[in-house]
Image: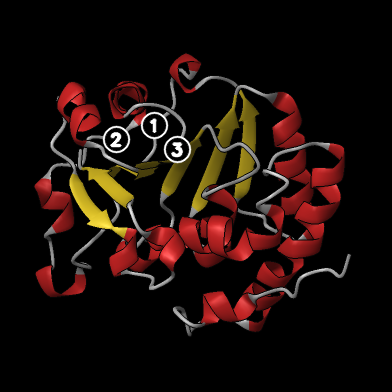
């Protein structure tokens, strides 16, 4: 079977300011995930041909809406094969991303991919998020891992309490959507899930960011902290 093209045009269609190194890193993901997926299944077999749409671009919807300031400490809860953490670490090379998962073999793939493309701002830990102690992060991110009530329960003890002053010291220099709290990607009818969470998240339709049909009924949720 002929291998699908890299489809980097799907990414550059929406993001124009990548460096040559970032483009090389993004382009390398196709072969790396195809090869590793043959050994350790971290992406659905039917989705591997749509890596850039269903995994990379989906992850980067966070970057389309939120800015992760320099030196941000970010935890990716239940990262699986490295999403959204790996694409975001490429996009924000000056922020530190800690990718955690309860399944160690998935983190092997993450570590190998990160090493192969020279991502020095990624660390991993084989642990459940609720077991992490004595460490705080600026932002928690996640993609389709657990109900919002659980994600928020796991995230809250890991987040630095910022307060509004930290974001408004110099109003005109602070991005309107500075990343904070929990940012997660979810799909479908979320009414009941949000109600049961007790949270009042900001909710953005991914289809309003990216025009591809795949993103209909997919949402970006942000619970500020």
Q: Is residue 76 above or below residue 134?
A: below
**How far is mark 2 from mark 1, CA to CA?**
6 Å
Extreme residue toward the top, this view: 131
Disc 2 is placed on an element classified as loop
Q: Is residue 43 left or right of residue 10?
A: right
Q: Is residue 29 above or below residue 104?
A: below
Residue located at (54% from left, 40% from top): 98
Percent across and percent down for residue 206 are: 33, 60
Q: Nearer the viewer, residue 160 or 144?
A: 144
Q: Which residue is mark 3?
A: 144
Is residue 70 something one can see in this rendering? Answer: no
Percent across and percent down for residue 171 are: 11, 68
**How far is mark 1 from mark 3, CA to CA?**
22 Å
Q: Is residue 113 left or right of residue 134?
A: right
Disc 3 is placed on an element classified as loop
Picture disc at residue 136 = 1
Q: Earlier in the sequence, mark 2 or mark 1?
A: 1
Residue located at (69% from left, 50% from top): 46
Q: Earlier in the sequence, mark 2 or mark 3?
A: 3
Residue located at (73% from left, 46% from top): 45
Q: Earlier in the sequence, mark 1 or mark 3?
A: 1
Quadrant where the image shows the N terminus: bottom right
Quarter of the image where one finds residue 23: bottom right
Percent across and percent down for residue 209 are: 33, 69
Q: Is residue 202 above or below residue 214?
A: above
């Amino acid at each position: 079977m002929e291998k699908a093209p890299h489809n980097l045009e799907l990414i550059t269609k929406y993001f124009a300011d990548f460096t040559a190194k970032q483009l090389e890193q993004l382009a390398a993901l196709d072969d790396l995930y195809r090869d590793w997926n043959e050994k350790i299944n971290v992406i659905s077999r039917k989705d591997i041909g749509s890596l850039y749409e269903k995994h990379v671009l989906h992850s980067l919807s966070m970057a389309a809406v939120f800015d992760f300031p320099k030196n941000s400490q970010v935890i990716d809860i239940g990262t699986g094969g490295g999403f959204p953490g790996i694409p975001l670490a490429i996009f924000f090379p000056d922020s530190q991303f800690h990718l955690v998962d309860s399944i160690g073999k998935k983190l092997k793939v993450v570590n190998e991919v990160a090493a192969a493309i020279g991502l020095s701002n990624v660390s991993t830990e084989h642990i459940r998020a609720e077991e992490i102690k004595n460490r705080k992060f600026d932002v928690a991110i996640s993609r389709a891992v657990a109900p919002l009530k659980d994600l928020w329960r796991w995230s809250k003890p890991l987040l630095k309490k910022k307060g509004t002053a930290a974001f408004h010291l110099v109003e005109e220099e602070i991005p309107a959507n500075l990343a904070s709290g929990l940012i997660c990607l979810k799909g479908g009818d979320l009414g009941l899930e949000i109600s049961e969470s007790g949270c009042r998240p900001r909710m953005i339709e991914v289809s309003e960011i990216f025009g591809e049909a795949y993103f209909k009924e997919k949402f970006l949720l942000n619970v500020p902290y």
